[in-house]
Amino acid sequence: MSDWSRATGARLIGDRAPGELAAPRETITGNRGLQIEENLIFEQGSLGRCGIDLADPPLFRARLGGLERQGPIGLPGLSEPQVVRHFTRLSQKNYAIDSGLYPLGSCTMKHNPRLNEKLARLPGFADIHPLQPVSTVPGALVLIDTLAHWLKTLTGMPAIALSPGAGAHGELCGIMSIRAALEARGERRRSRVLVPESAHGTNPATAAACGYNVDSVSGNLQGRVDIEALRAKLDTDVAALMLTNPNTCGLFENEILEIAAAVHAAGAFFYCDGANFNAIVGRVRPADLGIDCMHLNLHKTFSTPHGGGGPGSGPVALAASLAPYAPLPWLVHGAHGLELVEHKKGKTQQAIGRLKGFHGQMGMFVRALAYMMSHGADGLRQVAEDAVLNANYLRVRLKSDLSLSFPGPCMHEVLFDDCFLRETGITTLDFAKALIDEGYHPMTMYFPLVVHGALLIEPTETESKASLDHFADVLKALASKARLGDTARFHAAPRWTPRRRLDETAAARKPVLRWHPEPIEQQAEQ
Amino acid sequence: MSTFRFTRDHEWVRLDGDLAIVGITDYAQSQLGDVVYVELPEIGHRVEKGKEAAVVESVKAASEVYAPVSGKVAEINEMLAADPATINADPMGDGWFIKLRLDDPKELDSLMNEEDYKRFIEEQS
């Protein structure tokens, strides 16, 4: 068998990956039309082939004292077209926001404007090196300062820490700042952080990572924090409340002012998870809600690519009480213009230190600022309005077919549970898999945990009415098929993907984490 | 008459000589789905009624298992680490989690009996 036929048809032999269920062999090759069965790159090519001409190394004397490699290391030998085809085929198996609606609740998978990309590629930003002298990059400092100004204006907060590399990293920054502030006022003994059930899953992890005990606060029947349950838990042992607003049920915490007052009365800090800021940006300033500290996800609210498309960025807005503890570096307005302070001295003496190498995700700063400036304040307000409008449009169109978890308007995402599947023998998982067959990435499943068999849908503001209508029609049709007893469709799904339903249980119980090559001798014979 | 006692968080406890055996109920395992990982406390560790005693993880979610009663961990079910599927197959038998030396056997009286628990589940669903 030649190398080339191996590259497209080796699965003919029929060996299945562990955990993979049997798929019908509809074609001779295993390919499905132009969707190619692609082998691992290590299964392709041959020893000794190389994409470029390299001269054999001249004779040399090894100076490794007998530790030099004894045999081949098994790297695949591939030509340039083989490499290009391999990675192009893999990329074609991907589903991305650029290929379709991506309603993954809590993740804000919205369009990333190409203008952001164009500006991030300007050589003046893209080609600078974090170690080059600060005096040579005044433009970058102005950009960072301008971004900080926008974020401070939108949050109403006096300070912003830009270096955290993602939302959870921002939470870490916030809780470390709170801990530093408590220690500075001589309060080391506060040991608990309160986290409502409707908070993001990273919140309790952050509190635990900072050495606090996590104390869960129950929700009420409206999907919001039960303020009496919260009051009962607030005492002088509580360091902070970590609230997600809007919460993971897609609901605005409408008693947030009372919550803030109660938290402050107990001498604790009020941390807000701002991952869902896209629902309120331009309409609500977190500082006005009594929030002391909140992270923002540039990669969600401000449209920088994420989910495999780029790094996250999680700046943290800080109230005056927490600003002295912000991590380094600081950008300050000095006598000679903007000054980058990278070490503890003077005003930065109380900083919690560094959380990240260099200055944060510069490429994301450029994209986020491009997004904000191209939208303007009015445009950002419309972002929030349209995100909420789109989610509510789906809520109303689907409420009689799927089962809505909480009554009334939602914010940027809408939560359904699996009541509509009761007695059908179909689970949330089956339903989501059937959606893949229809050409959609599924919504978030089984999260949040506060409802049974959750389906959390976040359409985002960048979907048109036509796009939402098509998605709603597909969901309604699937729900109808489920009601009418077409269970086989759901249990067999997905049928049209490169792989059928994966055995997640076997993958978790007996993970195979390493691919082992065929013995070298055999490979050499082919 | 069943000797099992139940919590509202779907744990069960049963006296076996002077030890109390603790596990999760059949309803709990059916809601979790296939269990893929279990984290048990160390022998000698003290657990407190209503506080976390173990963690159970399925393909759907990770959940805490709360101690139904207070006491000291006398034994743990070592078999679960190698074969967490036992919890799905036999939650009330071989799928037990820990055995506790009780602080106060009277604590058992505050828990539901089998009949009450059955009614409790029906109300839940």
Image (cartoon, rainbow, N blue to C red):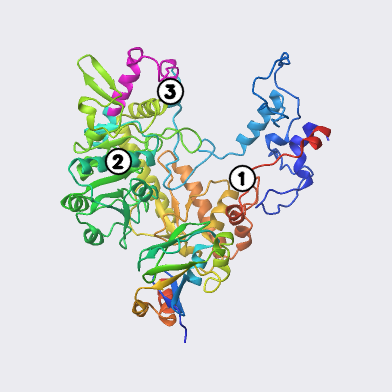
Labels 2, 3: one chain: yes
Which secondary structure dominates the residues rendered in magenta?
A: helix
Q: Nearer the viewer, residue B96 or A410?
A: B96
Tell me the number on the disc at residue A513. 1
Q: Nearer the viewer, residue A91 or A399?
A: A91
Q: Is residue A156 left or right of residue A112?
A: left
Q: Upstream in the sequence, badge 2 or badge 3?
A: 3
Q: Amino acid at mark 2?
A: Met
Instruction: Name the spot of residue A251 as percent of width and height, x first.
Output: 33, 52
Q: Tell me whether circle 2 and circle 3 mark residues in contact (CB < 8 Å).
A: no
Q: Is residue A366 left or right of residue A491?
A: left
Instruction: Specify the segment rendered in magenta.
Output: A123-148
Q: CA distance from mark 2 to mark 1?
A: 35 Å
Quadrant of the image containing the N terminus of chain A: top right
Q: Tell me whether circle 2 and circle 1 mark residues in contact (CB < 8 Å).
A: no
Mark closer to the observer (3, 1) = 1
Instruction: Name the spot of residue A97 as percent of width and height, x first.
Output: 50, 38
Q: CA distance from mark 3 to mark 1?
A: 36 Å
Q: Chain of mark 3?
A: A
Which class describes the residues within 10 Å of circle 1: few (<14), some (14-19), or many (20+)? few
Instruction: Name the spot of residue A267 as percent of width and height, x first.
Output: 17, 49
Quadrant of the image containing the C terminus of chain A: top right
Label 1 secondary element = loop
From what the image shows, is residue B47 above or below residue A365?
A: below
Tell me the number on the disc at residue A330. none
- Work out whether residue A526 can be spotted: no
Give the residue at mark 2: A176
At x 39%, y 47%, the residue is: A202
Q: Amino acid at mark 1?
A: Leu
